[in-house]
Amino acid sequence: MLLSLCQVTACSDTWCSNCEKREFGWHAMDALEALLNRTSVPKLTGPPPSGTNLENICQAALRAADHGVLRPWRFLVISGDSRHKLGDLFVEAAAAKDPTMDSMALERVRQKPLRAPLIIVSISCPQSHPKVPEIEQDLSAAAATQNMLLAAFAQGIGAFWRTGSMAYDTV
């Protein structure tokens, strides 16, 4: 699972009914408003979230439903030049899967991580547990990811949950 994020530079009534609360580069809203109004922002531009905004996004993951308090997830924050390295890994995986892929197709694969200024890779890491089956742990990782999306939205940060073939590749 990949979360692509960026700062939203302006409020829009289509997703935000509390524009007057925008202060200090972030937007606070109550939980119900975030739940009822969150939308994906597929075209991400602007600076990546950082500092307190990024910390809030990561902290929100820790509040996800987690039977057994196993925290069966890991997150990788990728920005800057690291996105180019991720693109190289994507090309390596795509070429291994389909050696006949032409150079233009490989270049499109290479560019995918550059669609957002910051990416959070969400990884489900289920553990052997006598009372918490793996499926519950996978669902907990998904809930943590959803909490991150809600935290981003609540702060006026655009985000988009992407998957696709690279999300399931072992690279």
Image (cartoon, rainbow, N blue to C red):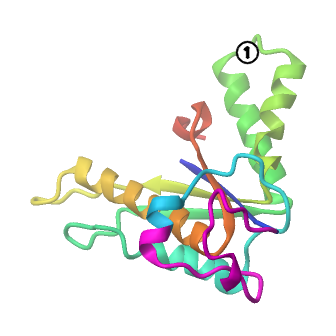
Give the quadrant of residue 8. bottom right
Read off the magenta span. Answer: 10-33
Residue 72's spot in the image, x, y percent? 35, 62
Residue 163's spot in the image, x, y percent? 57, 40
Q: Nearer the viewer, residue 159 or 142?
A: 159
Q: Secondary structure at mark 1?
A: loop
Secondary structure mostly seen in the magenta stretch: loop
Is 36 a magenta residue?
A: no
Quarter of the image containing the C terminus? top right
Residue 41's spot in the image, x, y percent? 68, 51
Q: Is residue 148 above or below residue 20?
A: above
Q: Is residue 112 left or right of 129 when viewed as pictured? A: right
Q: What residue did someone put label 1 on?
A: 99
Tag count: 1
Is 23 a magenta residue?
A: yes
Visible residue check, residue 147? no
Residue 12's spot in the image, x, y percent? 72, 62
